[in-house]
Amino acid sequence: MILDLHQQGLTVSAISRETGIDRKTVRKYIERGLEVPAYGPRKPRATVIDPFASYLRERVKTYPGLTGSRLLRELRDRGYAGGYTAVTDFLRDVRPPANPGFEVRFETLPGEQAQVDFAQFHVVFAYFGRTGQWFH
């Protein structure tokens, strides 16, 4: 693309504005006669926990309340040599979403419902004889 624009007679600054690439980078690629490489998404890398992924999914599906430390102990018994953080990072993606805990709001007409908050207060009265005053 850079070379095509350069062959059309555009200046380095114009190519830079058009492509959003820095002028020095545009100049470098024109001098070398190369196009800017187009990077795609990276391939996922293999992790230490991959061989145990199906086991963890099955355990979390059956018992969603299992902790990361408990599952780490189970994995260690099965030959896992990785760390705790790798297990918890994997569990974060696998666990079913927790109950959001929201409340459903409802409205009533005036006078149909009342709410009361109860509280208890303890007040201590003291008499200071010399001054003749009561304090609470």
Image (cartoon, rainbow, N blue to C red):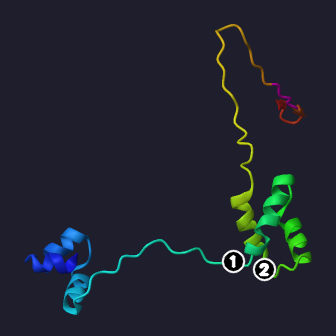
Q: Position of residue 93 (x, y in %)?
A: 69, 60
- Figure check: 28 above or below 60: below
Quadrant of the rendered image containing residue 31: bottom left
Left or right: residue 76 compared with residue 26: right
Q: Is residue 77 magenta?
A: no
What amino acid is found at the position of numbered circle 1 in the picture?
Answer: Thr
Q: Nearer the viewer, mark 1 or mark 2?
A: 1
Dot 1, crowdedness within 10 Å: few (<14), some or many (≥20)? few
- What residue sits right under mark 1 in the picture? 47
Helix, strand or loop status at disc 2 = loop
Q: Quadrant of the N terminus?
A: bottom left
Q: Residues within 10 Å of mark 2 (few under 14, many from 20)?
A: some
Q: How many marks?
A: 2
Q: Main secondary structure of the magenta part?
A: loop
| Chain-order first, disc 1 or disc 2 | 1
**Residue at figure coordinates x 23%, y 85% from the top left:** 24
Q: Secondary structure at mark 1?
A: loop
Do the CB atoms of the residues marked 1 and 2 lie less than 8 Å apart?
A: yes
Does residue 14 appear left or right of residue 57 in this picture? left
Tell which residue pokes out farthest to the top in this image: 111
In this view, the residue farthest toward the bottom is 32
Residue type, label 2 = Gly
Query: Is residue 26 positioned above or below 90 on the image?
Result: below
Q: State the extent of the magenta-drawn residues as a range.
A: 118-122
In terms of depth relative to the viewer, which is nearer, 114 or 46? 46
Residue 112, position as x, y percentages in the image:
71, 8
Residue in the image at 78% along x and 65% along y: 54
The quadrant the C terminus occupies is top right
Q: Tell me the residue that label 2 is attached to.
A: 82
